[in-house]
Image (spheres, rainbow, N blue to C red):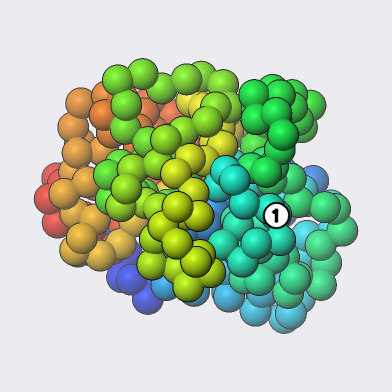
């Protein structure tokens, strides 16, 4: 694991540079995506789109994978992660050729869907380059803090602060998903390269716990300390409680 501290406004370019290096090395890369606020707040996906339009990035041979999805809403629901990715990235990429792979949170048999997704990842040879954010409670993908974290894809109970309860797309709180389908630690550790972005004062405490504290299932991101090729990109505010 290596840590880079850069200005917030440089995050989008740095992540795009790393992605460009990955695709230059392997144009057929399996690219792991992330949802949440970071790709939008820091303009990460917008920079990829800009570079593609400028002819600096191309995704003709790449495959996209998302590690998680909310359970209980259809793929075309505006709050689904499939809808998020379509709106903010996939629909705007001109060189995207293959259908992105995202778990089906609306599957009739969720356990069978977990097994299907694990097999898909194995068939792909796992992810070559995985973008991640850091949850305020230390989650990565939707691997929430727990006494036990499964190795395989599983159904995760969402912490209350991570449920989209403020969305106008749900008529009542009962409609708001309480669970997600998410990869387990095996898929995280088998990703060949991970790029995690965390910025802002509100991430400082969790950054310190995750990347300079003990490795524990209570802070799932702490397992990235064991990853052979994880790059943690922080701004000064998020890095202020760690020693470099």
Q: Residue at x 42, y 72 (%)?
A: 41
Classify mark 1: residues with Cα within 10 Å, few (<14), some (14-19) or many (20+).
many
In the rendered image, the quadrant that contains the N terminus is top left
Q: Is residue 140 left or right of residue 180?
A: left
Pointer 1 residue: 75
Query: Residue 154: where, in percent of width, then height?
Result: 55, 27
Q: Quadrant of residue 212?
A: top left
Residue occupying image coordinates x 47% and y 20%: 150
Q: Residue 209 at x, y = what percent?
A: 19, 39
Choose top left, top right, bottom left or bottom right for residue 104. top right
Where in the figure is residue 234, as x and y percent of width and height? 31, 57
Identity of the residue drawn at 14% across and 56% down: 240
Front position in the image: 169 or 195: 169
Q: SS of the residue at dot 1?
A: loop
Let me know if residue 14 appears in the view. no
Q: Nearer the viewer, residue 139 or 97?
A: 139
Give x and y (percent) for residue 20. 64, 59
Residue 179 sits above or below residue 33 on the image: above
Nearest to the observer: residue 72 or residue 116: 72
Quarter of the image for residue 81 reads: bottom right
Q: Exactly how many numbered labels are in the figure?
A: 1
Residue 34 visible, this angle: yes
Query: Could you say which is closer to the camera, residue 105 or residue 19?
Result: 105
Which residue is at 48% across, 40% downward? Answer: 179
Q: Is residue 189 above or below residue 91?
A: above
Left or right: 234 in relation to 81 = left
Q: Is residue 55 above or below residue 204?
A: below
């Amino acid at each position: 694991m290596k840590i880079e501290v850069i200005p917030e406004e440089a995050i989008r370019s740095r992540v795009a540079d790393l992605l460009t290096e990955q695709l230059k090395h392997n144009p057929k890369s399996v690219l792991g995506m992330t949802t949440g606020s970071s790709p939008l707040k820091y303009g990460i996906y917008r920079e990829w789109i800009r570079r593609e339009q400028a002819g600096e990035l191309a995704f003709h041979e790449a495959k996209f994978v998302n590690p998680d999805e909310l359970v209980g809403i259809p793929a075309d629901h505006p709050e689904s992660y499939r809808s998020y990715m379509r709106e903010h990235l996939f629909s705007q990429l001109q060189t995207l050729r293959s259908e992105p792979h995202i778990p089906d949170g609306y599957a009739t048999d969720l356990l069978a869907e977990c097994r299907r997704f694990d097999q898909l990842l194995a068939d792909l040879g796992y992810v070559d380059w995985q973008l991640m954010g850091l949850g305020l409670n230390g989650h990565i993908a939707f691997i929430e803090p727990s006494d036990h974290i499964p190795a395989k894809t599983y159904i995760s109970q969402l912490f209350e602060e991570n449920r989209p309860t403020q969305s106008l797309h749900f008529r009542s709180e009962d409609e708001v998903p309480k669970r997600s389908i998410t990869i387990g630690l095996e898929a995280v550790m088998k990703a060949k390269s991970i790029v995690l972005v965390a910025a802002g004062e509100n991430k400082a405490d969790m950054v310190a716990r995750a990347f300079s504290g003990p490795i524990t299932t209570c802070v799932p991101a702490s397992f990235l300390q064991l990853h052979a090729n994880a790059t943690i990109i922080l701004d000064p505010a998020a890095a202020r409680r760690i020693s470099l």
